[in-house]
Amino acid sequence: MIKLEHISKTFTQKKIRVEALKDINLEINDGEIFGIIGFSGAGKSTLVRCINLLERPTEGRVIIGDTELTSLEDRKLRKIRQRIGMIFQHFNLMPSRTVFENIDLPLKRTGMEKKDRIRKIESLLEMVDLSDRRDAYPSQLSGGQKQRVAIARALACDPEVLLCDEATSALDPQTTEQIITLLKELNKKLKLTIVVITHQMSVVKDLCDRAAVMENGSLVECGCVYDLFADPKAPLTKRFLDTASNIKSFMDILHQKGSLADINDGTNIWSLTYTGESTGEDLMTQICEIYKVRVNILYANIDYIKGAPLGRLAVHISGEFSKIEDAVAYIRDKGVKVEILK
Ligand SMILES: Nc1ncnc2c1ncn2[C@@H]1O[C@H](COP(=O)(O)OP(=O)(O)OP(=O)(O)O)[C@@H](O)[C@H]1O
């Protein structure tokens, strides 16, 4: 388990103090894929760099397994860092070295014999499906292939933890999907704990088990990814998820005069969030039949979060007021989260 206890980090540059992290407490379980999300400048990279002490926290303790990293002297810390691999947005490969040589770099430092290193590199290349590119230089590879090399290099010393700092941000959606699939495979096969910083919601939805949301150096919310999407508690989480989905465009027109959502008959526009079994029900048809109300669907979306459906509707319900109330109660009873949008 990775344990961050009361982590704070303050940078001082030209007498200006930036509190990048403020009293962060977080536990990441072994074998888990954990996401860290938040707007730019929230402190995500600093937090992840504190896990392997690339950045030393100003205060607090970093514990991995039963070792407190923050109390180790440099030599021991270098050794234990081998248990933590890291990959980056821009891959950080050595341009003058081949794929094979790039992966060999961390292995050489361990003092491993050449024949063992060759065997190890060959198995890593196979794992990331790049056996045929072992003698290529980074400039001869696509972005996705470069990230595969970086992953192989990060895994060379058999780490327990892989830190990914915006590892798919420079890749197109299809290549991102391939890297997500590879990371999932590695997580399963090697029981690797993976910590992912990302602003790509597809990465959070498809890859992560749990995620933490950061704002101004603090953790504002942490939980299972499905719950974060289905029922965000903190206003920032809500805002962040809305920004990343196309409901944002709908919300933008909600208060515009003359738009579909410009309704002034005293009735409401409702947001309905369907989770679990409720996603399969034809509830709108049911309330029309039972309560004789009319439903106008203004927005509809269905997301799949690690394969589980999550539906969102924005609807205008018209009819007798008391019937509308009964219809809304009926939908709520079926496990749908109902909120007034307007
Ligand atoms: N080495 C540094 N020196 C001074 N300030 C820094 C340093 N590194 C980060 N900061 C500041 O700390 C804050 C958090 O930065 P950080 O890079 O961790 O945010 P982030 O959430 O990862 O942002 P982004 O998504 O844009 O990468 C920012 O205000 C940043 O300017």
Image: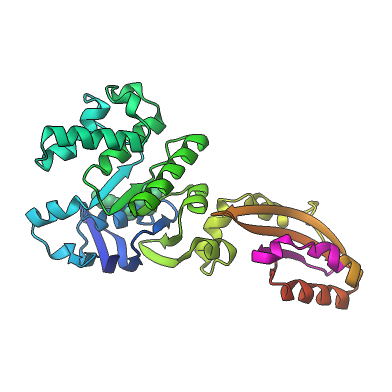
The quarter in which the C terminus is drawn is bottom right
Q: Is residue 272 in sight in this rendering?
A: no
| Residue at the (18%, 40%) spot, across then down | 106
Task: For residue 283, say whether it is visible.
Answer: yes
Between residues 171 and 15, which one lies in front from this camera angle?
A: 171
267 magenta-colored = yes
User: Is 302 included in the stretch rendered in magenta?
Assistant: no
Question: Which quarter of the picture shows residue 191?
Answer: bottom left
Q: Is residue 119 above or below residue 280?
A: above
Q: Which residue range is magenta in the image?
A: 266-287
Where in the figure is residue 189, as x and y percent of width and height?
37, 49
Query: Which residue is depicted at the point 25% across and 61% down?
Result: 9
Q: Nearer the viewer, residue 58 or 198?
A: 198
**Residue 192 drawn at (x, y percent):** 33, 53
Image quarter (top left, top right, bottom left or bottom right) of the N terminus: bottom left
**Left or right for 122, reference 167:** left
